[in-house]
DNA sequence: GATGAATGAGAATTCATTCAT
DNA sequence: CATGAATGAATTCTCATTCAT
């Protein structure tokens, strides 16, 4: 019974933490890191400012926690997607599909994620970006291996370096995602991963 | 003679303005918008802070001016590149080449540019992004037209919607540019626009 | 039996109170009143913070209790020492000896005590100092009376006002104590009360 | 003329700095370091809080500056007093006289000074105390030398270690100063340095 | 017209204290 | 009755902006 009580408290804490993170996500993605005050987050999450500081040692920590959580979730899903099958073509389709799903479900954090991974990030000093970049690099390496292996099996033509193809796939999927994030109803993407893959799969020119 | 005097003064003013912008570019791209103070920019550009405020009505205005200037330069160069020839293939190669050149020559602003165009920018309130996005959209439309026209001439296969191909080309070129910005010596890109185009031109699969 | 239970509880309470005070003493004397939080004291004394507030109505009250306790102890010991004998010379020696013993045994509180009795204390508003000052004044009066009586018996020469001599003795003993507190091994004082008295007893000059 | 302008500005700055320090002295000595906010000091000195921070990099710096300034002044005056004459008796009288004068003229800072030199100082971490303690130690050494030299000339009896006599003199003078600070009108001290010296000079007992 | 000293609103963070469990 | 999570007032410090010289 005590166990139950403890876990109830623990669960309650987790719920609170999630609410704080949610308020942070919403505000940060809407207004940018520096244009959001801890007081705002406190108000939005309906906690006292002091309570916020019980959960996160400072503003940066709260921000990092948001990014870290998404990164973790994203990384897990991607790695799983790539291991689900042995077929290279299927792996690539899975990659694009899963990326789309995650982004759709977390639209507002994704803005933050892009802010952190692209361009001059908020917190050059933060050092969080290093961790993220390492995960992204890991994904690129995994994709590159898939291209490489597909080439060895003569599934794919060696039209470019495997690593470059990996970057290309990542880039294309992100771009179409962006398109969709900006105008969810008009853009086809998250529903159709094949469109992106086709751009890579078929050559444009009649060679 | 008064005209001459005025224009000399005018030229002098322009030079000063450029120095201020240059200082801003360097600092903003290195440390991020919110981590740079107007005093720093004043010191770096060797003007008094009051003088800065004679040229730009506030910090945001200075920032916007930087972005606007790059956007303008970029837009001009791209539009010229696309009009230089009638050959669709050549147009696309020009697009990639010019984009590469601009980015290489303005590496530090480009970080700012990405920060502004991708993800949650520092200053969503700024409203500057609207102007930028419009220019980018114009480029996309131009590229789409090129793809369309190439398809009509049967130069290109209709492997995807012209607009999607435009987005793809923009995305790929930006990604490889990023790669290069992060590790200038190892990456081939700005030297070789064809690598990118090949990814689109040849299909991966043996169809 | 109820009485016994009550008194057992009472004793238990006293023990708890003492533990809280002890934690406070250690922390306050090490870091200063304002650099110690109630949470720290709670943790160090191994009570919940709420329990602390059952015993002391606020932080200041806890602090005052510490000082009051030392003052009480000190006052008692001093008054006893002065009444132990009828010989004025012996009384003064007792005073210095007992002061030394108390201070040696409570080195860490003594820092607090000095902080409170000398200079601009942390908490002038506390109003505690009034009570302390009254006790000190009482000691001074007692010492003055001893000097006075010694003078009447022609034990002492009337080289200064009795009250001034009292102040002098208090001052000298405190100073040498300080010396000892700062470097316990090198200083002779608490072992040798006569050194201090000699400074008063023998004249410096060859008169 | 430019020189004049510069020095006028410089003088103006010094005047402002002094006003800030004065406000700090008054508030700190009245309420204690931690019970005074920077905003209060700003208000009292009639400057904006930001201006305070132009002159002092933080609260501690402002506090240290106050203490350092008094210490400097005090040290200078004491050292001069000790060098003014070659006669040991005169030197000691000078010491007591000058100390009295300084303290009378700076009554409120002296409270701070005592708080810093006695008991648990506000800022154990501050490290300022080290500098002060070194100066005090220097004074003690100087006094000890005077006693030593007086003893060698058989002006003084060797009734105690010279260093202990130095400590005794310092202690006595400070104590009577305290007395006076608490009740300026009733206490004779600062007017009569000889009273203190007599306590040391004549022996109490009829030996 | 240039200057930079002065301003003060606003942000992050701490911690004494309360009170529901 | 003990507990310690939650509270929010108060504090330090920064920096965009103004304006007297």
Image: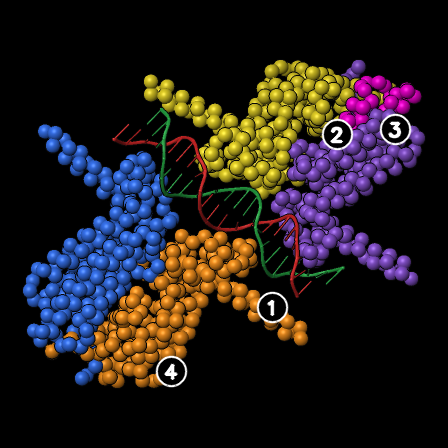
Chain colours: A yellow, B purple, C blue, D orange, E green, F red
Which residue is rendered at x = 31% and y = 84% of the image?
A: D87
Indicate whether residue D22 is drawn in magenta: no
Res. B166 image quadrant: top right
Which residue is rendered at x = 39% and y = 60% of the image?
A: D29
Residue wearing tag 2: B171
Which residue is rendered at x = 19% and y = 83% of the image?
A: C206
Res. C85 image quadrant: bottom left
- CB under 8 Å between discs 3 and 1: no
- CB under 8 Å between discs 4 and 2: no
Are labels 2 and 3 assigned to the same chain?
Answer: yes
Residue wearing tag 3: B89
Read off the chain for label 2: B
* Magenta residues, start to end: B146-172
Are labels 3 and 4 assigned to the same chain?
Answer: no
Residue wearing tag 1: D9
Q: Position of residue D203 (x, y in %)?
A: 17, 77
Q: Residues within 10 Å of mark 1 (few under 14, many from 20)?
A: few
Q: Position of residue B116 (x, y in %)?
A: 70, 37
Read off the chain for label 1: D
Gap between marks 1 and 4 measured at Cα: 36 Å
Residue wearing tag 4: D84
Nearer the observer, disc 1 or disc 4?
1
Quadrant in which the C terminus of chain C appears: bottom left
Q: Is residue C113 above or below residue D183?
A: above
Are labels 3 and 1 assigned to the same chain?
Answer: no
Q: Nearer the viewer, residue A201 or A15?
A: A15
Q: Is residue D64 visible?
A: no
């Amino acid at each position: 019974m005590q166990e139950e009580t403890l876990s109830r408290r623990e669960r309650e804490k987790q719920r609170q933490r999630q609410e704080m993170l949610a308020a942070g996500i919403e505000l940060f993605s809407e207004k940018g890191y520096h244009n959001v005050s801890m007081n705002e987050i406190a108000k939005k999450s309906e906690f006292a400012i002091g309570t916020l500081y019980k959960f996160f040692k400072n503003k940066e920590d709260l921000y990092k926690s948001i990014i870290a959580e998404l990164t973790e979730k994203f990384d897990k899903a991607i790695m799983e997607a790539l291991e689900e099958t042995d077929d290279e073509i299927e792996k690539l389709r899975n990659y694009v599909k899963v990326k789309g799903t995650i982004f759709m479900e977390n639209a507002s954090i994704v803005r933050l994620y892009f802010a952190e991974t692209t361009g001059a990030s908020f917190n050059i000093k933060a050092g969080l970006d290093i961790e993220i970049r390492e995960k992204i690099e890991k994904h690129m390496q995994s994709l590159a291996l898939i291209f490489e292996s597909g080439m060895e099996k003569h599934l794919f033509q060696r039209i470019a370096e495997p690593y470059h193809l990996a970057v290309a796939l990542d880039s294309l999927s992100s771009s179409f995602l962006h398109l969709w994030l900006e105008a969810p109803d008009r853009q086809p993407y998250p529903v159709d991963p094949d469109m992106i893959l086709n751009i890579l799969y078929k050559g444009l020119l009649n060679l």
